[in-house]
C-alpha cells in the first residue's frame, strides 16, 4: 500500500499567531479529488498555504508529498513546490510577457535549462488544456477562462504529484467554471491528486467528490446530499 500523499495528525493551523483550524487529522491518498469548502474566513486558504509552505506548521504532525511539514526549512520549499502544482483564483499570469514566456519563466525558475526540452514541455501542457494556439498571445488577449486553462497548464509543467486549486473558478462565469472543472476532473482521472478549495456549491452538486468543510475552527468530512 503506497503512502498517503497527505497525512495530518492533530494539526493546528495558525495565521500569524492565531489558531484558525484546530485538531485536524486527515489522510489524502494518491489519485483522490478532495473539495475544501467553507465560508470566507474559515481557514480554507490558511490550510492550503500550510500545504505549500507559505505558512509554517507549528503544531501537530504532517507530511505532504514526502516532506515533513513540521520540519520544513526555507531551502526545502522550492523542492516541495516542484512536486505540486498550484492554481489560484486570479490566474497570476505575468502581464508583461506572452503565454509561452509565462510558462518558460516557471521552468527556468524550477531548474530547467535545455531550450528544446522546455519548448516541447510548454507545447505539451498547453495541448493538454486546449490552449496550444494561444502560445504567442499576451494574457490580456485571452478570456478569463482561457487564462485559467493556461494557469492549469502552468501547474502541470513539472508533472506534479498533486494539484492545489485555491478557488480556481472564483473569477469565472458559471459556464466557464464548468469547463475548467471538467478539465480538472480529466486531469484527476489521469492519476493526479487534486485538492480544491471552493465556495461554488453548484459545482459540488454537478461534480460530486469527497468534501471537507472548514467550520467552527476545524476541518471535517461532510456527506453530500444527492438529489
Image (cartoon, grey):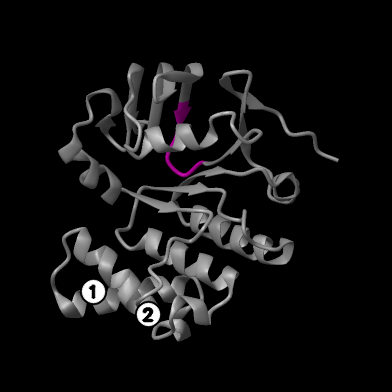
3D distance between C-alphas at marks 1 and 2: 15 Å
Which residue is depicted at the point 73% across and 44% down?
201
Residue 98 disc label = 2
The quadrant in which the C terminus is found is: top right
Q: Nearer the viewer, residue 115 or 45?
A: 45
| Pointers 1 and 2 in contact (C-beta within 8 Å) | no
User: Is residue 197 depicted above or below 183 in this figure?
Assistant: above
The quadrant in which the N terminus is found is: top left
Which residue is depicted at the point 68% across and 61% down?
178
Most prominent secondary structure in the magenta stretch? loop
Residue count near mark 1 (Cα–Cα under 10 Å), binned few <14, some 14–19, many ≥20: some
Residue 130 disc label = none
Residue 118 disc label = 1
User: Can the viewer see residue 123 in this picture?
Assistant: no
Secondary structure beneath disc 2? loop
- Residue 183 horizontal/vertical position (percent): 56, 62
User: Can the viewer see residue 219 in this picture?
Assistant: yes
Instruction: Tell me where the magenta segment starts and ends, as one range.
Output: 27-32
Q: Is residue 75 left or right of residue 128?
A: left
- Residue 69 horizontal/vertical position (percent): 29, 28
In reply to whether residue 5 is colored magenta, the answer given is no
- Residue 35 horizontal/vertical position (percent): 59, 40
Amino acid at each position: 500500500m503506497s503512502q498517503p500523499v497527505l497525512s495530518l495528525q492533530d494539526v493546528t493551523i495558525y495565521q500569524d499567531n492565531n489558531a484558525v483550524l484546530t485538531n485536524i487529522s486527515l489522510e489524502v491518498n494518491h489519485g483522490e479529488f478532495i473539495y475544501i469548502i467553507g465560508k470566507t474566513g474559515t481557514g480554507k486558504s490558511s490550510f492550503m498555504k500550510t500545504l505549500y509552505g507559505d505558512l509554517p506548521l507549528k503544531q501537530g504532525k504532517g507530511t505532504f508529498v514526502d516532506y515533513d511539514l513540521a520540519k520544513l526549512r526555507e531551502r526545502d520549499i522550492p523542492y516541495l513546490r516542484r512536486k505540486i502544482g498550484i492554481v489560484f483564483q486570479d490566474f497570476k499570469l505575468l502581464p508583461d510577457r506572452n503565454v509561452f514566456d509565462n510558462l518558460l519563466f516557471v521552468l527556468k525558475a524550477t531548474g530547467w535549462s535545455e531550450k528544446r526540452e522546455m519548448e516541447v514541455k510548454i507545447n505539451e501542457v498547453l495541448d493538454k488544456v486546449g490552449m496550444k494556439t494561444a502560445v504567442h498571445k499576451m494574457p490580456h488577449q485571452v478570456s478569463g477562462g482561457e487564462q485559467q486553462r493556461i494557469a492549469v497548464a502552468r501547474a502541470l509543467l513539472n508533472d506534479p504529484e498533486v494539484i492545489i486549486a485555491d478557488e480556481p473558478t472564483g473569477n469565472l462565469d458559471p459556464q466557464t467554471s464548468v469547463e475548467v472543472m471538467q478539465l480538472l476532473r480529466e486531469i484527476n482521472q489521469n492519476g493526479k491528486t487534486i485538492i480544491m478549495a471552493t465556495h461554488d456549491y453548484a459545482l459540488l452538486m454537478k461534480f460530486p467528490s469527497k468534501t471537507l468543510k472548514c467550520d467552527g475552527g476545524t476541518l471535517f468530512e461532510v456527506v453530500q446530499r444527492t438529489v
